[in-house]
Amino acid sequence: MAKKTNAGSKDRISFLRGGKRAEKAEGVDFYDYNLLAVVVLLTCFGLVMLYSTSAYEASVDFGNDMRFFARQAVTSALFFAVMIYGSRIDYHWYTRFAVPVYILANLLLIATRFVGRTINGARRWIYIGSISFQPAEFAKLAVILFFPTLIVHYGWKFRKVKVPLIVFGLGVMTSAFTYVFTDNLSTAIIILGIDYVLIVVAHPKPKRILQLTAVCVLVLIIFLLVIRSTNVLESSSSFRMQRIITWLHPEENQDKGGYQVMQALYAIGSGGLFGKGLGNSTQKLGALPEAQNDMIFSIICEELGIIGAMIVLLLFAFMLARLVFIAMNAPDLLGSLIAAGIFAHISLQVVLNIAVVLNMIPTTGITLPFVSYGGTSIAFLMLEMMLALSVSNQIKVRSV
């Protein structure tokens, strides 16, 4: 059997006191094969569901039922290989590029407004020849790498008020760039959420931050209740306000975005406990537009039922548990914060996607990690897992 050393907690304290890098604990290198296994399972499951969901639409629109599946499979395989190779490199090496990567990410967000291509009414993609990517996805990885590096750089100064405000201000800036220049509110929320989680995790007095957050949330809830009780929403022509109206009354606003939500709910309701069977969805046959993207969870519910949906959620829960394990046992604060940032990203994105599908929040267009179609998304998710596995590879265990 193997037992973890407790050097990680001491080293994290030394980082907060301004140390540049913690000394390596004695022992054998650890590698989180459990996290690797769940990445493989989610990716393979995602490919199966992607083909089942998109084959009909791809055949009708492009004459090739494998179009979406083949693209996703190639990207997944390529970046899976990158993940395996890159995870053997010490994560401290990657932080050398944290600053230029963060600057590049912000510049690409700004550039999207001027050189980006509009698809389905949203200008979020930049094309380099035949290759396209979303700078907003790159920005998530950039903040996960940059903010932990910045916090560790400040060391004990992070205990003061000024430094956390600087870190939070930079997060607000990147989040604002994401919203203003790519019109991607959901990713902007996720970036700000990652920044917030990292500040709470790293700060020596997180209770004060959580108390202030609770007050702000309470004020926001009261504000929403007040405007809902008036006719402010109904009288507004704002795009965001229209989305809120559609969320509150989707059956009355199917021509303004409620149609997709209603079809997703029909799919979930018709699946029952065990589902109709893999490949037997009827909502994907044109009723639910682009089901392979942000609404793929509804097709999972329709074909595999509540049981299938619960299995997917358990896989995500296991992935998040492994990220918590890595964060708690990392050899230094830097590794802990990188794992915490990845945890924040995955958890926020899963919760937001499922909440949208269940019509618990207004539609945001956010995808389900490792499952929804999107080459840029799967590529940067694999890179995040590479960082997490790299941190795990630096954990030391000793035989007893």
Image: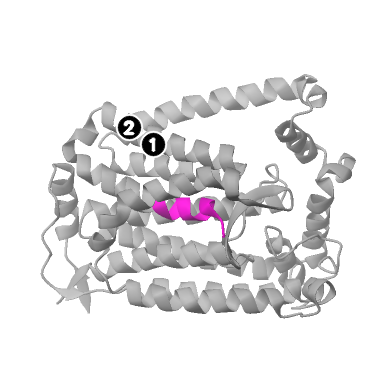
Find residue 296 and report its horizontal and vertical position in percent: 70, 63
> Does residue 136 belong to the magenta stretch?
yes
Q: Is residue 37 visible?
A: no
- Residue bearing the label numbered 2: 166
Q: Residue at x 23, y 67 (%)?
A: 395
Q: Residue at x 53, y 46 (%)?
A: 111
Up-down relation of residue 174 to residue 397 (above or below): above
Q: Residue at x 35, y 64 (%)?
A: 387
- Residue bearing the label numbered 1: 170
Quarter of the image where the N terminus is located: bottom left
- Compute the Cα span from label 1 to label 2: 6 Å
Residue bounds of the magenta highlight: 133-143
Q: Dividing the picture into quarters, in which one does residue 285 lie?
A: bottom right
Find residue 84 and report its horizontal and vertical position in percent: 37, 77
Disc 1 crowd, CA 10 A, few/some/many (<14, 14-19, 20+): some
Q: Residue at x 68, y 48 (%)?
A: 122
Is residue 357 shown left or right of residue 183?
right
Q: Relative to the observer, which residue lies in front, 78 or 321?
A: 78
Disc 2 crowd, CA 10 A, few/some/many (<14, 14-19, 20+): few
Is residue 22 shown left or right of residue 146?
left
Find residue 295 and report its horizontal and vertical position in percent: 71, 59
Find residue 219 and report its horizontal and vertical position in percent: 55, 22
**Residues tagged 1 and 2 counted as in contact (Cβ below 8 A):** yes
